[in-house]
Image (cartoon, rainbow, N blue to C red):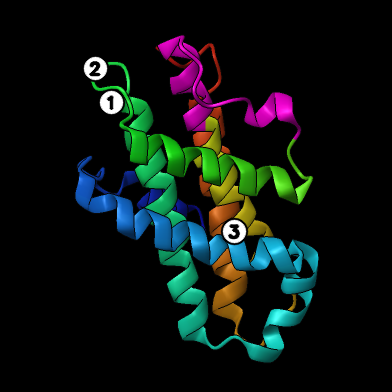
Amino acid sequence: MHLIASAFNGGPPLERSPGLIGPALQAAHALSIPVRMGINFVARSQALSWSVQHSLSNLECAIFLSKWLEQLAITSTAQPLDKDELRLVQMIQGLLSETGLFGDDWIGAIGITNMSDQKYQIRRLATAVARMWAEIFKGNHVFEVVNIIGASLTIYAESMESAYTPSNVA
């Protein structure tokens, strides 16, 4: 599982472009469905309706969205978020707030003028996205690969979180 999480972490960064807004929006919508239904409910009941393809598709959404947010954070100092990126980041922030699993102090407010704070908050959102998907994958599953995906996403989120602590972030 550590090897899989390392592969997630070591994957190539996304190149920031307006063409990624649509796919990022779709990945956020994929997360919005379990959030609206209830993370614990989906985690417990997905075994009844999800195939391996559902799980792999959701894994792709988790990695893509966290990598997209990570790239926004990395490049936001040199290139501020445009209005579409900002709107999508705020939508993701609101979505994660709906879960009740993250306090406002943890998710923060995106749109802050201090670029260093904005960079840090977007990185935390990237971590929160990976954590949310990891929670969804923690339920009972028919396919063992889904449990491996969940555990690997948890390790991936933990590695992002430790990399983004204020003492480790430039």
Residue at point 31%, 50% (across, down): 21
**Magenta residues: mostly which secondary structure?**
helix
* 20 displayed left or right of 54: left
Residue 75 - label: 1
Task: For marks 1 and 3, give the CA distance.
Answer: 24 Å
Where, by quadrant of the figure, is residue 147 drawn? Answer: bottom right
62 and 161: which one is in front?
62
Query: How many C-alpha atoms fall within 10 Å of the one at disc 2: few (<14), some, or many (≥20)?
Result: few
Q: Is residue 65 above or below residue 86?
A: below
Q: Are marks 1 and 2 in contact (CB under 8 Å)?
A: yes
Query: How many C-alpha atoms fall within 10 Å of the one at disc 1: few (<14), some, or many (≥20)?
Result: some
Of the two numbered discs 3 and 2 on the same chain, state the one appearing first in sequence.
Answer: 2
The picture places residue 75, in percent across and down from the top left corner, at 28, 26
Task: For marks 3 and 2, give the CA distance.
Answer: 30 Å
Where, by quadrant of the figure, is residue 63 drawn? Answer: bottom left
Report if residue 159 is visible in the image: no
Residue at point 23%, 40% (across, down): 16
Helix, strand or loop at label 2? It is: loop
The picture places residue 14, in percent across and down from the top left corner, at 25, 45
Task: Please provide the residue range marked out in magenta.
Answer: 103-123
121 and 3: which one is in front?
121
Q: Amino acid at mark 2?
A: Ala
Of the two numbered discs 1 and 3 on the same chain, state the one appearing first in sequence.
Answer: 1
The picture places residue 11, in percent across and down from the top left corner, at 29, 49
Q: Amino acid at mark 1?
A: Thr
Q: Is residue 20 above or below residue 35?
A: above
Residue where numbered disc 2 is placed: 78
Residue where numbered disc 3 is placed: 133
Residue 114 counted in the magenta span: yes
